[in-house]
Amino acid sequence: MWSTYKLGFLLSHKSWTTSMEVAQIAHLLSETLSPDGHVVRASSEALDRLSQLPDFPFSLLSIAAGGENYGQKVAAATYLKNFTRRIINEDSTLSSKVSKEFKDQLMRALLQVEPAVLKVLIEAFRAIAVAEFVKQNSWPELVPDLLAAIQNSNLFSNTADCKWNTINSLTVLHALLRPFQYFLNSKVAKEPVPPQLEQIAKEVLVPLLAVFHHLVEKAVAIHDRTEMEMEKILLTVCKCIYFAVRSHMPSALAPLLPSFCRDLIAILGSLSFECSVTIEDGYLMRLKTGKRSLLIFCAIISRHRKYSDKSMPDIINCVLNIVKYSKKTSELNFLSERIVSLAFDVISHVLETGPGWRLVSPHFNFLLDSAIFPALVLNEKDISEWEEDAEEYIRKNLPSDLEEISGWREDLFTARKSAMNLLGVISMSTGPPMGNSSNGSSAASKRKKSEKNKRYGQRRFMGELFVLPFLSKFPIPSDANAYQPKILNDYFGVLMAYGGLQDFLRVREPGYISTLIYTRVLPLYTISACLPYVLATANWVLGELAPCLREEMSADVYSSLLKALAMPDKGDTSCYPVRVSAAGAIAALLENDYVPPEWLPLLEVVIGRIGNGDEESSLLFQLLSSTVEAVDEKVAVHIPYIVSALVGTITKLIPGNPEPWPQVVERGFAALAVMAQSWENLFPEELEQNELSEKWTSGRATIGRAFSALLQHAWLSPIYQSDREGEGSSPASCIDDSSTLLLSIMNSVSGSNVLLELKVSELLLVWANLISDCYSWDESENLSIFDCIKDVVNLHSKYGLKNFLVGRALSPPAPPVPQRSMIEGIGGFVSEAISQYPSATWRACSCVHILLHVPSYSFDADGVKQSLVIAFSRAAFCRFRAIRSNPCSLWKPLLLAIASCYLCYPDVVEEILGKGECGGFTIWASALGFLLTSSYESGLSEKSEIKLIVMALAQVVEELGLRKPSSGVLRDCFTSLLEASARLKEVQEENEEAEQDDEEEDDDDDDDDESSDYDELPTNDILMNVKCHYGKWNFFLDYLHIWLDRIRDLKPPPNIHGMWKFH
């Protein structure tokens, strides 16, 4: 809790800042602008110390308002902004204690400072206003004071000595209204207008709109120039109204909405889209005001139909005069094009409303012929972007994430995208509801419901009646007219229009789409002339319509796309967008379950193009991943060939410096990982055909050798090189995908000679060090690391890996201290995963038992094992303490991980648990017993889980029996031990019955041996006797010794991998 002296502006005191404090703080702020990092750190630390003073924020405010120079003022405003946010965020209860004195001084400063300082200082005001006025409504004088400031500002007041700035006062109003653009309580179905917003609207906005009207009349009357201050006022007022009506409609504003809309229409009517107009600062403000006016129209049409219906005809006429300039979008600046885009959006909004059809349908011909289609045709700006920035061209014109067509979209930003969206809305419209007349209504009421539905089903979309006939009049390019620019440019627009019609086309019969594609798209791929701009768009259209294609048609589409994918550059014209769009369309076909008759042609094209540019290679790697993920046997047989071909290319792409790897290399590793998994999944171990088995084994060996060569180049080469330079390092990129490659390498090991040939030990040592330093976590990443850990342990048990338990010693003259071993690096990763990442807890804890109990630790490695026990038990108990108050599914893996550690070093674990929390050992033992009760919802279902608890509790009982034979904890643990044993026997019997019912499964000799241990224990009898004679302590101890003698001979479960299922 902050002390009452932490913030000066949290106190209602009358002290003023001393000139000495202000001078000192000003000097330190100036030093924070120094290029010397040491000076900046020292001055920042000094400012942090001074921030404890009660007058510190007053000093900052004083400097921000009247500092020696511009940099000092901005530095003071920035520090005050961050300081205010930090204090309010750390303890929101303090926000109500901001003193009136500070708020008054802050308001006075805001009304006077220059624009650059105001831009920063306003953020401090907003933080206080949100906390006090918006959330708590505890700043009653704010609105009256703000109104007075606006009325008495320099542009609105008649007095000559006014010191308040009008633009500043309106900026404060804008900051105050910004939080109200969203609903404040998302849990309320229909949130009423906040009273604070009603107050602002009534007391400030209503009189301000009267002034706004007069300013608009004055502004539009001036044709040859603009007044900067007046344009700023118009823009700021429009922003304020936008925030006020975006979600709510204050009652005081509703009656003024028609006149306000007329003012906005006047502003929009004053805009010029002629290229000859010079964009001066004042006119730039006018354009911004026009953009904000259209955003207001979108808001009131979508949110406040009740108040906007009467204004819709005028709004439509206004935006129709704007969209006709879409034919000039290639010549317009960004802001002007954005206005045209928003004008299209306004029409889409209106068309989605009840009266929309009546208002817009008479203009369909004009819209399509003079506005929408001109925005779609190819223009000079498109060609320039194609040549100068192909990625930008693809992002704007061939989007792979085109969302559903909707009249309510507000995120389109370009005139072309907005025109396509409007075209889609028009195509899905079916006209007004039939039977609106009184006669029609009475007649309809007499018809049967089935007849009504039949009649409705016969209604036809405007896409069929109007849009497609319009597009069909444009001839498709052919060899005869391929060099006529108008035909190519227009057909580019036709294809873009087809992309906008995808929602309409998807609701049509498949034959309808087939006819369209066969007659209007696929013939483009048979033309001998080079048509890169048209073909790229055609590829994109085919990709968007891929889910609607029939299987027999998909083959023809795939053949055409494959031809486009292999298209080389034509002279100075790059065909990169053609290949990119073709790759995206082919991926869409594959995702929709299309299986080509032959995979090799596609694979050869992809592999042949990879390496010709990083951006294109990245995309082709993604396509290759999609192709392999099809999990088709015809693809899988080519995986060894693909891997061998790609490894050399990726090796050349890996940079000489360790980090960071470029995206193309990461995509390459990801593609290889997909291929490795597909090869293992497609040919399971059950296959016993000799020919197929040998082919699979040979392919696995080829893949393993290729992956080993790649990782040696990526990991070992930097290490060898840096060893010569005196330091060791290797890249930490693509850890998860690299782990998948390592899994494939380890699976290919068939003997010790292969282990040495592939340098598996060296690669695993580097990998273990890399994952130990991996501190980032993603839910979808690092999954292969855990699988790799299990395989590493198994491989060591089978062949004995070098440096697995004890690291190699450095050569002289380095000190004779061994480097970190494999298991130490792995242990560091596992303990970090347990401590920091809840999503990894199950997987990490499942590795604890494997790392501690599967390897055979020599005497020299006993210290390594003990260090692992310390790290695992500390991490698991720390995580358990954080969630102890609420029993959940994570209890089980954490408690069982500690149990595995306890079986290795009971005294060490007991000491760690005691240091973690007083009585920590007792807490853990009690929680371990709780897992066996019915109160624990997750429960224990695996035999290995119960067996581990039995052995851990037996160890606990034995330790407590020697030291505290009369403690209540011993009684509880022994009872839990008996219950666990009874549960274990029940599970064992259930497993035996299941094995008897399944004749195809062989008996497991190891399981029989384990079950015989428990068959000798009279579990149920002892449990019943203990419960009956619980008060007889001697009787209890007798049974304790019987149980300890029998459990002491048990061994830990050899493999507890299935103990914790991956959640």
Image (tube, grey):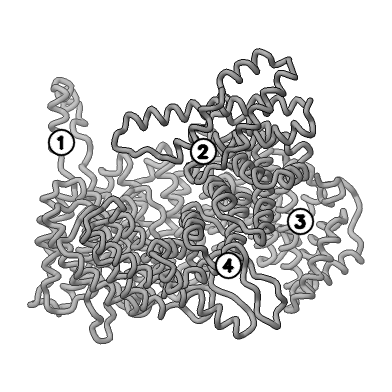
User: Which residue bears the numbered disc 1?
Assistant: 457
Q: Is residue 86 left or right of residue 188?
A: right
Q: Earlier in the sequence, mark 2 or mark 4?
A: 4
User: Which residue bears the numbered disc 4?
Assistant: 803
Q: CA distance from mark 4 to mark 3?
A: 71 Å
Q: Earlier in the sequence, mark 3 or mark 1?
A: 3
Amino acid residing under circle 1: Gly
Between 404 and 313, which is closer to the camera in this rendering?
A: 404
Circles 1 and 4 in contact, beta carbons < 8 Å: no
Q: Quadrant of the N terminus?
A: top right
Tell me the element at label 2: helix
Q: Is residue 795 left or right of residue 393?
A: right
Q: Quadrant of residue 967?
A: top right
Circles 2 and 4 in contact, beta carbons < 8 Å: no
Between 1028 and 536, which is closer to the camera in this rendering?
A: 1028
Amino acid residing under circle 4: Asn
What residue occupies the far top of the structure in this picture? Answer: 1028
Name above or below for residue 447 compared with residue 957. Answer: above
Q: Earlier in the sequence, mark 3 or mark 2?
A: 3
Which residue lies at the image location 34% right of the left edge and 48% below the top edge?
407
Between 647 and 384, which is closer to the camera in this rendering?
A: 647
User: Looking at the image, can residue 321 be seen?
Assistant: no
User: Which residue bears the numbered disc 2?
Assistant: 944
